[in-house]
Amino acid sequence: MITELPLLTAEDTDDVRARVYALREHWIARGGEPAAFLTLGTPSYLDVAERPETGHYQRHGVAARPLLLAHFQDLYDLIGETLTEHLDAPVRYAGHLALPGFHIWLEAAIFTRPQAPVHFDLQYQAFDWPPGTDTDRLLSFTLPLRVPAAGGGLNLWDVTYRDFRRSLARGWVESAADLQRFHTLRYVPYTPGHMYVHSGHVLHQVAPSSSVRPGDERLTLQGHGVRCADHWLLYW
């Protein structure tokens, strides 16, 4: 259901974090004040979903690409190499979509109750894909760089998007969140520097932390992938 792949040392995670903070002027605040939940990069689940007709996602994804490559090319290369080995197929970054980017939760945005949306990753449905694409073969990945002192991770339920569509058609549920009543929650704690990979079509949720301490943060790199013919295309 989910695979954990060691990727970075503690020293490496500190280095990547420092580079993210060096680009603080490029962070984009998401949500209300105070601005404590931010992104570096262009997430499709926010920038397509909120303004699909404006081209905002494409413009900002293209604009952010040179900045992200200039500061994180080595990290993108390492992620690509690691996923290529794990998937036993070449991995490329989609040139027409945004590069994987960063979620930044500062102390005020870290939550201690399960308030994040319970969801499947369906961003791929918003885009056109080349011939030979198999949208049943998907992946989502998270690389945590920092988690709160009390821990951070992912909530998972052993139920798929296909299961949800079947249950919805039969009138058993009205939303993905309803599936929680019928399936056992599994909590996956994050280790900074390890990459976590799943299909995106398994029901999941950003897990709350048990407590928040002064100076806590949650910093992750996020991305998705789609199988296209003999290779995978990564994007955010």
Image (cartoon, grey):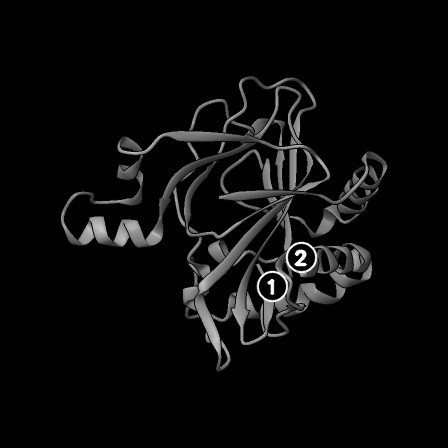
Q: Position of residue 151 (x, y in %)?
A: 61, 24
Q: Depth-wise, is mark 2 or mark 1 nearer the camera? A: 2
The dot on residue 83 is 2
The dot on residue 41 is none
Q: Is residue 135 left or right of residue 224?
A: left
Residue drawn at the location 64% of the way across and 62% of the way down: 88
Q: Are marks 2 and 1 in contact (CB under 8 Å)?
A: yes
Q: Position of residue 132 (x, y in %)?
A: 49, 79
Residue drawn at the location 17% of the way across and 54% of the way down: 169
Q: CA distance from mark 2 to mark 1?
A: 10 Å
Identify which amino acid the numbered label 1 is placed on: Leu
Secondary element at image label 1: strand
User: Which is more N-terminal, label 1 or label 2?
Assistant: 2
Assess disc 2: are there few (<14), some (14-19) or many (≥20) residues with their C-alpha within 10 Å of its C-alpha.
Answer: many
Assess disc 1: are there few (<14), some (14-19) or many (≥20) residues with their C-alpha within 10 Å of its C-alpha.
Answer: many
Q: Is residue 41 left or right of residue 184?
A: right
Question: On screen, 157 above or below 45?
Answer: above
Residue projecting furthest to the front: 88
Q: Is residue 208 left or right of residue 216?
A: left
**Observer able to see residue 54:** yes
| Quadrant that contains the C terminus | bottom right
Residue drawn at the location 42% of the way across and 67% of the way down: 126
Q: Quadrant of residue 53?
A: bottom left
Q: Position of residue 71 (x, y in %)?
A: 81, 56
Secondary element at image label 2: helix
- The residue that disc 1 covers is 234
